């Protein structure tokens, strides 16, 4: 084989390898944000709701949720407070949670809160862990706020370790 | 010149294998670090603490056990130079605070913040070399009326800074903090709905550049201002001064986002966000808690990394 045939191959290979060695183009992967007052406030309120679920604290949930509260999921009809509370206080076990990427749109007496929630949980013994995208509508109620609408979509289920087969 | 066919095949195969291995090795180095090691600072995330990483300080400059942890990265030492890019319309923009008055007030604020009682709280942070000095100075500032348009993204902010470092209107200084301050006609993803400002670090012009963004908070008084009547009669400037103190303190104590933050990822400023402590009342009825640079200011407290830790206005 002649060198003039080999050289182009070599030059392509070397170019590809050199390109791989190039330093990664700097990207803004991380930034540390100073939360708005509303993000601080509603992070606290959302935590209270989740802690109410965790502790199965009916009275604190009733203080935070509007009487006409409805929760919407991608599949199925909206669930009213009357139906949701017994389910969430019954066989739902919220072990841990994390709220992130919150943003709040302020419309005066109404705010729209959007955030990501990752959780470890089980419902009726079935694993319900994973990541969720939540959109909540809070309405002003006197000096405080009440959650009136929740739209929740599961982004991905938790990746669980494989069950032991006994053959390992 | 000719190679025997058999030898050239072997040679080519060997070369291919070597280069392929090299290529794959380079790709592996470029994988993003796992985010399972520690909670990175986010500034506003409430979550269940999961801190697992804790660097052991080896020098005498690092004090721990005050509600905030050291993660091994550097802090900014000495008298920190501050560079400002005033972006947008700071002459006569949509809000009254898009004005030269605001520019003058922020200049006075940056001129007086270094060595102030509040900034000395930052001297409780250090790395294995030395502690933060608590001094800073306004090194230089430029005006850009809109080279990147009115709708900023993270990449446009990077381009903005990069262009001014490349064209020499600002020096490329890895020991300083660059501030991008935008007027109210400029939008930035997440400003007012998620954050009032942010800080970060990035390699620009071959150096690690620490920079922060703060917009004119008159765009969202309910989200980013503590009071509408403010000590200097300019709610935009006074609100920006508060956010700036937060960002500057964090950019100095955690410039590369790997030095000081707590188990839930909060840096020193985050731990006292919109927490002002004891205040006094100015003649116009507004509240203030700091006086320097010839003005009164209402500035959030900073987390003191001593005596068990607390939000503090001074040492």
Image (spheres, coloured by chain):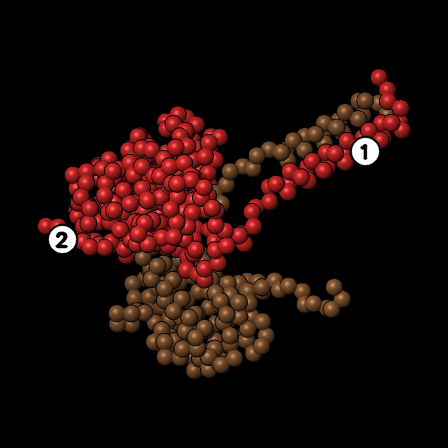
Chain colours: A brown, B red
Q: Which mark is residue B281?
A: 2
Q: Quadrant of residue B82?
A: top left
The quarter in which the N terminus of chain B is drawn is top right
Q: Nearer the viewer, residue B290 or A168?
A: A168
Q: Nearer the viewer, residue B274 or B144?
A: B274
Residue on which the image places disc 1: B13
Mark 1 and mark 2: Cα distance apart in space: 80 Å
Identify the residue shown where x is 43% and y is 27%.
B166
Whole-percent x, y for residue A88 in the image: 47, 77
* Residue B310, above or below B257: below
Identify the residue shown where x is 49% and y is 71%.
A94
Whether residue B178 is visible to the viewer of this picture, yes or no, is no
Chain bearing mark 1? B
Whole-percent x, y for residue B198 in the image: 38, 46
Secondary structure type for disc 2: strand
To the question of a shared chain for discs 1 and 2, the answer is yes
Whole-percent x, y for residue A89 in the image: 46, 79
**Which of the two discs, 1 and 2, labels the residue nearer the N terminus?**
1
Q: Which mark is residue A58?
A: none
Identify the residue shown where x is 50% and y is 51%.
B53
Which residue is outermost to the left?
A: B283
Which residue is outermost to the top?
A: B1
Identify the residue shown where x is 58% and y is 65%.
A157
* Residue B265, above or below B99: below
Whether residue B263 is visible to the viewer of this picture, yes or no, is yes
């Amino acid at each position: 084989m002649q060198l003039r045939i080999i050289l182009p191959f070599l030059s392509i290979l070397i170019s590809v390898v050199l390109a791989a060695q190039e330093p990664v183009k700097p990207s803004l992967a991380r930034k540390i944000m100073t939360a708005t007052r509303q993000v601080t406030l509603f992070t606290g309120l959302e935590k209270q709701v989740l802690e109410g679920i965790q502790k199965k604290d009916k009275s604190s949930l009733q203080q935070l949720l509007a009487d006409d509260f409805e929760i919407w999921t991608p599949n199925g009809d909206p669930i009213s407070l009357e139906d949701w509370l017994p389910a969430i206080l019954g066989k739902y076990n919220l072990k841990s949670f994390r709220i992130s990427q919150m943003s709040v749109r302020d419309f005066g007496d109404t705010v729209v809160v959007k955030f990501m929630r990752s959780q470890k949980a089980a419902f009726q013994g079935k694993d319900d862990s994973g990541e969720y995208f939540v959109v909540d509508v809070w309405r002003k109620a006197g000096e405080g706020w009440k959650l009136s609408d929740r739209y929740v979509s599961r982004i991905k289920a938790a990746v669980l370790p494989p069950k032991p087969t006994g053959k390992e | 010149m000719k190679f025997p066919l058999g030898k050239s095949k072997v040679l080519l195969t060997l070369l291919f294998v070597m280069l392929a291995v090299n290529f794959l090795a380079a790709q592996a180095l470029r994988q993003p670090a796992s985010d399972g090691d520690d909670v990175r600072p986010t500034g506003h995330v409430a979550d269940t603490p999961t801190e697992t990483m804790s660097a052991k300080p080896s020098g005498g400059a690092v004090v721990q056990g005050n509600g905030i942890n050291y993660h091994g990265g550097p802090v900014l030492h000495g008298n920190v130079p501050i560079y400002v890019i005033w972006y947008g319309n700071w002459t006569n923009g949509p809000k009254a605070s898009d004005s030269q008055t605001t520019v003058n007030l922020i200049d006075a604020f940056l001129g007086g913040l270094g060595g102030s009682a509040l900034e000395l709280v930052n001297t409780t942070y250090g790395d294995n070399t030395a502690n933060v000095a608590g001094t800073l100075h306004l090194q230089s500032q430029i005006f850009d009326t809109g080279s990147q348009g009115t709708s900023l993204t993270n990449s446009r902010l990077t381009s903005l800074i990069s262009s001014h470092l490349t064209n020499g209107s600002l020096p490329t200084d890895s020991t300083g903090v660059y501030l991008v301050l935008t007027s109210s006609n400029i939008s930035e993803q997440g400003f007012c709905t998620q954050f009032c400002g942010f800080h970060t670090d990035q390699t620009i012009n071959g150096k690690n550049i620490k920079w922060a963004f703060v917009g004119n908070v008159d765009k969202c008084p309910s989200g980013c201002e503590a009071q509408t009547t403010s000590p200097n009669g300019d709610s935009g400037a006074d609100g920006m001064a508060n956010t700036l103190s937060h960002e500057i303190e964090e950019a100095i104590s955690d410039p590369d986002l790997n030095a000081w933050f707590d188990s839930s990822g909060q840096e020193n400023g985050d731990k006292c966000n919109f927490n002002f402590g004891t205040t006094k009342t100015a003649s116009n009825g507004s509240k203030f808690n700091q006086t320097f640079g010839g003005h009164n200011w209402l500035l959030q407290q900073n987390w003191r990394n001593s005596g068990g830790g607390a939000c503090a206005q001074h040492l």
